[in-house]
């Protein structure tokens, strides 16, 4: 019975989907190693909270400034080739950083130690900032292409299943397998996990390269049956912005997600200092805490589609917002790291539930010829707030440290995180209802493909 079910699922999703799945698993294993390696490297290079948040700011800044042009590019070129090129670029950038770290190894403290020195290695710090900025730019274009590629590989009826399985595998690699491996590698040398990360990018590029076919967006036809000619960059970008902004469901969803990500980055950009100075733990526990996220992600990825149908997709989104408003302050109050592990599992579970529902919804209702641009506008709102959240986190800790202890300052960002989610729960419960989401799916094929679907509901 189980064997037949697995075979049926493979037939539904297809061999090309599994190439994408395995490629994503490989690169996310490298990213999971980086979850431990990069923050720990940053804390070895500098102990200044604001300088550490600037690294997170640099990594996420491209989502604010490059997301919209990336959408136009995605709708003009072969999406598979973009993914291959960007993964290869990330492999080169990461390889250069690994070489630089290896050359500076003698000047760095022991990688498995909790660093207390206030010294800043300026040259290496600037290189880390530059590398994260370039990696972030490549990630914007690669991820936007990956999301717009999925509907070409999987039928609309199986998008939630495909996305759920993809994110489950990605989360297992990213937060379950990667971090422990990263903590082992970083105990040997700072550069070793970065080398592994570079290799994972090249491996993912090779697998996606093996997916056959051309994956360019098909433009709507003119009255004589010929494909419409490409408009100017500005006009194409304006078309994507207009489509999203006129959509009564995706517009508030994008704004709410942006504020969610901002709140998470307020605390997340300083997590390494929180683990070191508040919980008094080293790289191994830092990795284990991150693994808590994998537990929640696996559960959500496997059951998100079922929960969406059972409880209603709008109810599931409300659960995400309400649960996160409670979980974040509890992390701020925690004194024992296993409690933080459990809270991270719960936080990721509800966050993954949001991702599976909303991304599958976008892939189903946005016209294919606009998918790259509308996705990029959506992600501009959703991910563009990440660097702002990192800056807010650094400012909060800097200001609170002037009036209170550094430990209380590092705890305070979690209360800011929770307060933002509480406000979002109040507004999101009314704006993102199950009726509105179901109506958007039902109206996924409007009469005029240049206009968004009409969404009814209360």
Image: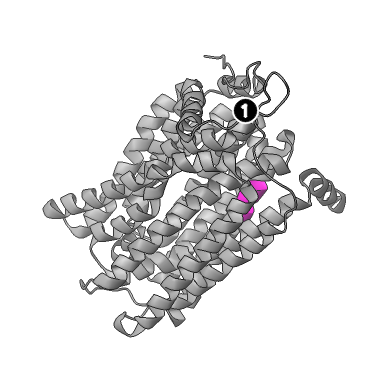
Q: Residue at x 52, y 69 (%)?
A: 198
Q: Residue at x 45, y 58 (%)?
A: 135
Magenta stretch mostly in which secondary structure?
helix
Q: Nearer the viewer, residue 34 or 207?
A: 207
| Secondary structure type for disc 1 | helix
Q: Position of residue 61 (x, y in %)?
A: 36, 49
Q: Is residue 87 above or below residue 73?
A: below
Q: Position of residue 208 (x, y in %)?
A: 67, 57
For the question of whether residue 322 can be seen, the reply is: no
Q: Residue at x 34, y 43 (%)?
A: 417
Report if residue 168 lies within the magenta region. Answer: yes
Which residue bears the numbered disc 1? 365
For the view shown, which residue lies furthest in the left direction?
403
Q: Position of residue 141 (x, y in %)?
A: 51, 49
Q: Is residue 388 above or below residue 218?
A: below
The quadrant in which residue 278 appears is bottom left
For the view shown, which residue lies furthest in the bottom direction?
106
Colour scheme of the picture = one colour
Report if residue 341 lies within the magenta region. Answer: no
The quadrant in which residue 21 appears is bottom right
Q: Residue at x 63, y 55 (%)?
A: 169
Instruction: Give neighbour class at mark 1: few <14, some 14-19, many 20+ (Cα, 10 Å).
Output: many
**Left or right placement of residue 269 versus residue 50 in this view:** right
Q: Nearer the viewer, residue 26 or 368?
A: 368
Q: Which residues are magenta?
A: 164-169
Q: Position of residue 359 (x, y in %)?
A: 58, 37
């Amino acid at each position: 019975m189980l064997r037949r079910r697995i075979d049926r699922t493979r037939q539904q999703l297809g061999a090309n989907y599994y190439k994408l799945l395995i490629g994503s698993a490989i690169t996310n294993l490298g990213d999971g190693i980086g979850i431990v390696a990069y923050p720990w490297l940053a804390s070895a290079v500098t102990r200044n909270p604001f300088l550490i948040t600037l690294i997170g700011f640099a990594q996420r800044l491209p989502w604010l400034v490059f997301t919209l042009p990336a959408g136009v590019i995605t709708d003009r070129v072969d999406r598979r080739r973009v993914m291959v090129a960007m993964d290869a670029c990330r492999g080169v950038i990461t390889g250069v950083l690994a070489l630089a770290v290896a050359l500076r190894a003698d000047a760095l403290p022991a990688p498995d130690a909790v660093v207390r020195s206030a010294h800043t290695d300026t040259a290496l710090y600037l290189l880390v900032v530059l590398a994260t900025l370039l990696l972030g730019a490549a990630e914007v274009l690669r991820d936007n292409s990956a999301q717009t590629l999925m509907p070409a590989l999987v039928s609309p009826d199986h998008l939630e299943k495909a996305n759920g399985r993809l994110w489950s595998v990605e989360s297992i690699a990213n937060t379950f397998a990667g971090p422990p491996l990263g903590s082992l590698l970083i105990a040997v040398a700072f550069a070793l996990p970065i080398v592994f990360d570079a290799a994972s990018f090249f491996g993912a590029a090779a697998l996606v390269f093996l997916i056959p076919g051309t994956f360019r967006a098909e433009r709507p036809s003119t009255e004589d049956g010929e494909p419409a000619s490409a408009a100017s960059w500005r006009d194409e970008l304006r078309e994507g912005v207009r489509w999203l902004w006129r959509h009564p469901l995706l517009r508030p969803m994008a704004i709410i997600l942006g504020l969610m990500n901002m709140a998470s980055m307020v605390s997340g950009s300083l997590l390494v200092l929180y683990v070191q100075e508040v919980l008094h733990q080293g790289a191994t526990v830092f990795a284990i805490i991150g693994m808590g996220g994998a537990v929640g992600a696996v559960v959500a990825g496997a059951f998100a589609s079922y929960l969406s149908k059972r409880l209603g997709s709008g109810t599931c989104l409300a659960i995400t917002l309400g649960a996160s408003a409670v979980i974040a302050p509890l992390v701020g109050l925690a004194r024992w790291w296993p409690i933080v592990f459990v809270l991270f599992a719960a936080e990721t579970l509800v966050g993954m539930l949001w991702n599976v529902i909303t991304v599958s919804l976008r892939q189903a209702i946005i016209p294919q010829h606009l998918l790259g641009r509308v996705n990029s506008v959506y992600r501009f709102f959703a991910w563009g707030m990440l660097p702002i959240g990192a800056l807010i986190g650094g400012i909060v800790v800097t200001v609170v440290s002037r009036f209170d202890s550094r430990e209380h300052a590092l705890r305070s960002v979690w209360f800011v995180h929770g307060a933002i989610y509480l406000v979002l729960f109040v507004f999101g419960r009314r704006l993102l209802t199950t009726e509105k989401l179901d109506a958007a799916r039902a109206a996924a094929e409007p009469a005029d493909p240049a206009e968004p679907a009409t969404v009814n509901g209360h």
